[in-house]
């Protein structure tokens, strides 16, 4: 199977879906002439011309709304935010327009749109450019929220998102764009709302998504080697809808759980996972579910402080020792 | 045809409105759309319009009256129309004739005096549940295997019973108290002691714990330890060894804390057998230093080290970890300032030892830095009363603050 | 300004067209009066923004587009929904929150939708529907159709970022959209002069090199002509226009707000009512003998009956079933 980067997997998905459906177009800052701020859209302008690959001014609220308006009359826009930090300017259109249109029109107007771009922290970009905001969007009924961790999932989920008749918030990761993995040639989709067990284990479940999948996998390797603890790694892939079946099944097997996420702790994705577990797997829990999150602070610039703020394998291992009563 | 003037919903959240002033009087001719009155809603001052034409025959809610939305505040009808039936219809919806504010405050019924029983109950804070702490999974497993959780000792944080504790308990009978010797005296329970025991169990759970904390100045103990360890032979003395020695010595002076709670009686010991909590890989075990009150600091140091090693290697025999009369648990090495330990039944007391830390303290009106340590004693209230425990703890503190007192 | 001005040129040959405009204005005014009463009786809840006074704008403009053109409006849109083709009963039922409402009772006064007639809302966040309208115009260009988008909004929306972002992109990309600002002079209780540095809304267009025009919004024929010009520009040249119609609302911002008080005087309101768009058209049709008193009375009777039927329809329409709570959140 060909090995490609996460970036190119996304590029393939866009290219294939634009080939497949003439209603699909890509709009955003620097997507065309510049070839994409992170080169996800490389070559698309040449392949599809400026009718379908549209460079915008820096006006997130405006072009997000134009995307929603185009979706109201049946087009299938893919709106690229250079990063999700800038998408905060467009939250009104994502939440008040895209998410609610179907409901408040009594089912008349679906909004088949994808909002995509990198989220989370990269390296030393400081407070305004380093944040994982998936829980903001996941809070809103009417939106779907996905955050793939691997090239395979990135391509399959983006194709599924573009074909979905609902607004999908698609969170990529700047630090993931160069990640490599096997991606089959040809058409496939990864269903939205289905988690993936990335590694099987029996002693503890590590629940993660996006960049923290790597963190969890590294922790799992060390847990096995150093402490003889067998960790199961569950990649949520979709935050909303949340695949509670897979989560609950895993924890019923392992009896212990640590949620690893890049967002802040308060009202984070992990809080929702913990809520599901305490209701649906209460009698299977041998310890309280613990969470490893970003520190509850704006992201510092300093390299060491930044490293300390992010989830890492050491913090995951410490949490696992606690839930497995190994301290 | 007569038209009822209703208090209208003039805002989405309005439940009642206040008639600020009528712009029309009874007898005035009004036409549909004309403003009858000004009404204060929860949001603004609004105009109440006539919904029909005729004569404003009756005002039912005067200036200043606050009435519910939907209440009739007036009636518009032809000058000669009989409105009697309207005035009588649905009295519950009729507005009160006068302003709410005009009601004398005294007409409000006085508050009911609380019954003495209620008042008494309110002053007694409900006791916190002394429930057995266990993980949900451990509870389920114990139920499946017919095990009483109360009989299982928990190895999790705060004594939480977790899965492995239930599994271990299921394959091994609980340690039974070691055989007795003549080194004790059984005392039958007096009525008052029985009643205290019963009531405290009812209120707090299987073991009615209470806790006493004191802070000990460890400067002298540290000096003594440094001197002793400066001698070249013999085992190194740890702070914990000094604490064990002090506790053992103090217990000889406070037999009322060196005891077991047994069903129907309390056993007071003349000998001190100290249970020393040792963390092992999968939990916690308490090997016993027998006759600790008779042993030298060197013997205690050597024996506690040896027992701890054997505990970690799982080499202890049941005799070696049962039969203690009092427990000491030390988490100072984990930088725990203070904590409350869970009593190791049938023992009646435990001292939990926190870390030794430098702290500013006032000595002779000067702020100075001293090494301080916190001791927290857990007491079984069926055996030890507050003052009993406090006196014992005071002795321990004095001994540690003046190590010579240990051998006095 | 005591005597109302004559209307924009009236042509004797178009009597039937004028009758239609008059009838539509009478219909939506009566509709709003009855909606206000139903609100006061508790049959309508939430926010309810009435259009009384501004009828010439919606009626004039919506008669200047084709049925396949798209319409977007703000939350003061009962009249727009009706004139765009929605049955008054379906609008009233929506205000009543009933299943027979044009949004199934789930949208309410501020969220009227009628896809069948390309009436695309009903939007409750000031200025937020301007980019949506530009998006529909973008789709029109994308597909190569000649459909035009007509977007109504109040003058308070011109100070919000979405207005500027949208006008810039609409001009830059040459989108076929008419931005019709209904300048009724007050954003809730704040006069335009207290909220904007530039008091002529149409002048904002020069920032985006966009065509603009201002028109007497109390003159239904003037609004019609101006909109027709802007629509033609959009359809034939794909160019957007900022059209400012100067109008006046007789009611409070919403049913929960005072009609006058701290922010405007009763005298101002009474003077504005002399320019009433319905009265002006009516008087002129009588003066020019394009309509008789009897015909007007007959028309009023018909309109009255139509609104009563709308109320009856709304009243008889069932409440949405409990399971409607969870439908239409996602499209399967």
Image (cartoon, coloured by chain):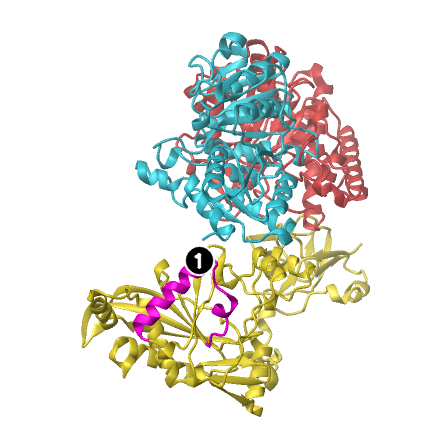
Residue B406, how many percent across, how many down?
29, 79
Asked if residue B213 is positioned above or below residue C78 in the image, the reply reads: below
* Foreground pick, A139 / B81: A139
Residue B61, how many percent across, how many down?
66, 64
* Foreground pick, C248 / C297: C248
Q: Which residue corresponds to the image point at 71% horizontal and 43% vertical from the top-left?
A: C325
The number of discs equals: 1
Start-end of magenta stretch: B296-325
Q: Does the stretch in magenta take in B199?
A: no
Q: Quadrant of residue C286?
A: top right
* Chain coloured red here: C
Image position of C192 (left or right of B116): left
Question: Dot 1, how many residues are within 10 Å of its Cα: few (below 14), some (14-19), or many (20+)?
Answer: some
Q: Does the stretch in magenta take in B323?
A: yes
Quadrant (top left/top right/bottom left/bottom right) for the N terminus of chain B: bottom right
Q: Which residue corresponds to the image point at 53% horizontal and 75% vertical from the top-left?
A: B178
Q: Secondary structure at mark 1?
A: helix
Asked if residue B69 is positioned above or below residue A80 in the image, the reply reads: below
* Foreground pick, A152 / A202: A202
Image position of A311 (left or right of C117): left
Residue A195, how many percent across, how many down?
61, 34
Quadrant (top left/top right/bottom left/bottom right) for the C terminus of chain B: bottom left
Image position of B47 (left or right of B215): right
Can you identify the residue that label 1 sits on? Answer: B312
Q: Which residue corresponds to the image point at 35% horizontal and 35% vertical from the top-left?
A: A126
Q: Colour of chain A?
A: cyan
Instruction: Give me the chain letter of mark 1.
Output: B
Q: Colour of chain B?
A: yellow
Residue B125, how many percent across, how many down?
53, 76
* Foreground pick, B363 / B343: B343
Dominant secondary structure of the magenta stretch? Answer: helix
């Amino acid at each position: 199977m060909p090995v490609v980067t996460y970036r190119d997997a996304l590029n393939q998905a866009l290219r294939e879906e634009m080939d497949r459906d003439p209603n699909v177009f890509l709009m955003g800052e620097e997507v065309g002439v510049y070839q994409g701020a992170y080169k996800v859209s490389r070559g698309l302008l040449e392949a599809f011309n400026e009718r379908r690959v549209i460079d915008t001014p820096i006006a997130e609220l405006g072009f997000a709304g134009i995307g929603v308006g185009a979706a109201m009359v049946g087009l299938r826009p893919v709106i690229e935010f250079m990063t999700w930090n800038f998408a905060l300017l467009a939250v009104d259109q994502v939440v008040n327009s895209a998410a609610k249109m179907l409901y408040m029109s009594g089912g008349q107007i679906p909004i088949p749109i994808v909002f995509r771009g990198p989220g989370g922290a990269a390296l030393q970009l400081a407070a305004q450019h380093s944040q994982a905001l998936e829980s903001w969007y996941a809070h809103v009924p009417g939106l779907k929220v996905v955050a793939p961790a691997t090239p395979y999932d990135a391509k399959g989920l983006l194709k599924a998102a573009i074909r979905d008749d609902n607004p999908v918030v698609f969170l990529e990761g700047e630090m993931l764009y160069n990640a490599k993995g096997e991606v089959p040639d040809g058409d496939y989709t990864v269903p939205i709302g289905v988690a993936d067990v990335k590694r099987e284990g029996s002693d503890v479940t590590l629940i993660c998504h996006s960049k923290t999948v790597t963190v969890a996998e590294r922790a799992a390797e060390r847990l096995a080697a150093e402490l003889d603890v067998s960790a199961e790694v569950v990649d949520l892939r979709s935050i909303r809808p949340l695949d509670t079946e897979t989560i609950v099944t895993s924890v019923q097997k392992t009896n212990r759980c640590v949620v690893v996420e890049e967002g802040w702790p308060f009202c984070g994705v992990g809080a929702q996972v913990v809520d599901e577990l305490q209701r649906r797997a209460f009698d299977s829990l041998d310890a309280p579910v613990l969470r490893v999150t970003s520190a509850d602070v704006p992201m510092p610039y300093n390299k060491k402080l930044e490293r300390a703020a992010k989830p890492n394998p050491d913090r995951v291992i410490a949490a696992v020792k606690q839930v497995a009563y190994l301290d | 045809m007569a038209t009822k003037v209703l208090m209208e919903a003039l805002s989405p959240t309005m439940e009642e409105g206040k008639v600020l002033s009528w712009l029309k009087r009874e007898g005035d001719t009004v036409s549909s759309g004309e403003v009858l009155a000004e009404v204060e809603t929860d949001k603004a001052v609004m105009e109440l319009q006539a919904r029909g034409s005729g004569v404003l025959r009756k005002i039912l809610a005067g200036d200043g009256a606050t009435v519910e939305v939907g209440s009739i505040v007036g009636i518009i009808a032809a000058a000669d129309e009989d409105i009697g039936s309207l005035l009588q219809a649905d009295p519950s919806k009729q507005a009160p004739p006068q302003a709410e504010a005009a009601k004398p405050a005294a007409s409000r019924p006085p508050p009911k005096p609380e019954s003495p029983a209620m008042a008494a109950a309110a002053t007694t804070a409900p006791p916190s549940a002394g429930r057995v702490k266990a993980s949900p999974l451990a509870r389920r497993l114990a139920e499946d295997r017919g095990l009483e959780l109360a009989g299982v000792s928990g190895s999790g944080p705060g004594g939480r019973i977790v899965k492995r504790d239930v599994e271990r308990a299921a394959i091994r009978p609980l340690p039974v108290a070691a055989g007795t010797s003549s080194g004790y005296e059984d005392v039958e329970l007096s009525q008052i002691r029985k009643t205290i025991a019963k009531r405290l169990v009812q209120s707090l759970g299987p073991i009615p714990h209470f806790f006493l904390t004191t802070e000990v100045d460890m400067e002298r103990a540290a000096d003594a330890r440094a001197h002793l360890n400066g001698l070249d032979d013999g085992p190194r003395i740890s702070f914990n060894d000094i604490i064990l020695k002090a506790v053992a010595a103090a217990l000889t002076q406070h037999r009322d804390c060196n005891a077991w709670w047994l069903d129907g009686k309390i056993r007071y010991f003349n000998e001190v057998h100290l249970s020393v909590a040792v963390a092992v890989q999968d939990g916690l075990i308490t090997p016993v230093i027998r006759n600790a009150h008779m042993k030298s600091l060197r013997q205690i140091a050597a024996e506690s080290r040896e027992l701890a090693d054997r505990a970690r290697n799982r080499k202890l025999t049941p005799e070696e970890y049962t039969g203690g009369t009092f427990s000491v648990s030390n988490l100072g090495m984990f930088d725990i300032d203070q904590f409350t330990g869970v009593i190791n039944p049938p023992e009646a007391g435990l001292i939990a030892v926190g870390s030794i830390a430098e702290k500013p303290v006032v000595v002779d009106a000067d702020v100075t830095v001293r090494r301080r340590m916190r001791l927290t004693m857990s007491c079984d209230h069926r055996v030890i009363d507050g003052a009993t425990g406090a006196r014992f703890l005071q002795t321990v503190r004095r001994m540690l603050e003046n190590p010579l007192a240990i051998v006095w | 300004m005591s005597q109302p001005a004559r209307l924009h040129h009236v042509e004797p040959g178009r009597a039937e067209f004028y009758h239609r405009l008059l009838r539509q204005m009478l219909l939506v005014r009566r509709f709003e009066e009855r909606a206000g009463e139903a609100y006061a009786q508790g049959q309508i809840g939430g926010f309810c923004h009435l259009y009384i006074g501004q009828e010439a704008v919606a009626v004039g403009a919506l008669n200047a587009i084709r049925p396949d053109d798209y319409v977007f409006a703000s939350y003061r849109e009962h009249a727009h929904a009706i004139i765009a083709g929605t049955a008054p009963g379906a609008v009233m039922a929506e205000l009543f929150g009933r299943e027979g409402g044009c949004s199934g009772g789930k949208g309410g006064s501020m969220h009227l939708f009628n896809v069948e007639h390309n009436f695309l809302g009903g939007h409750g966040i000031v200025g937020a529907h301007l980019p949506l309208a530009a998006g529909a115009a973008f789709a029109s260009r994308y597909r190569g159709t000649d459909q035009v988008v007509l977007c109504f909004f109040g003058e308070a929306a011109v100070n919000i970022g979405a207005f500027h972002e949208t006008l810039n992109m609409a001009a830059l990309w040459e989108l076929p959209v008419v931005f019709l600002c209904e300048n009724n002079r007050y954003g809730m209780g704040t006069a335009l002069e207290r909220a904007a540095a530039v008091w002529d809304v149409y002048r904002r267009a020069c920032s985006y090199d966009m065509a603009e025009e201002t028109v007497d919004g109390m003159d239904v024929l003037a609004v019609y002509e101006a909109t027709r010009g802007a629509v033609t520009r959009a359809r034939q040249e794909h160019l957007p226009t900022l059209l400012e119609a100067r109008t006046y609302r007789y009611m409070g911002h919403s049913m929960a707000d005072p009609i006058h008080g701290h922010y405007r005087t009763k005298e101002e309101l009474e003077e504005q009512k002399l320019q009433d768009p319905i009265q002006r058209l009516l008087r002129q049709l009588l003066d020019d003998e394009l309509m008789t008193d009897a015909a007007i009375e007959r028309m009023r009777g018909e309109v009255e009956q139509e609104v009563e039927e709308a109320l009856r329809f709304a009243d008889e329409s069932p409440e949405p079933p409990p399971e409607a709570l969870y439908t239409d959140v996602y499209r399967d």
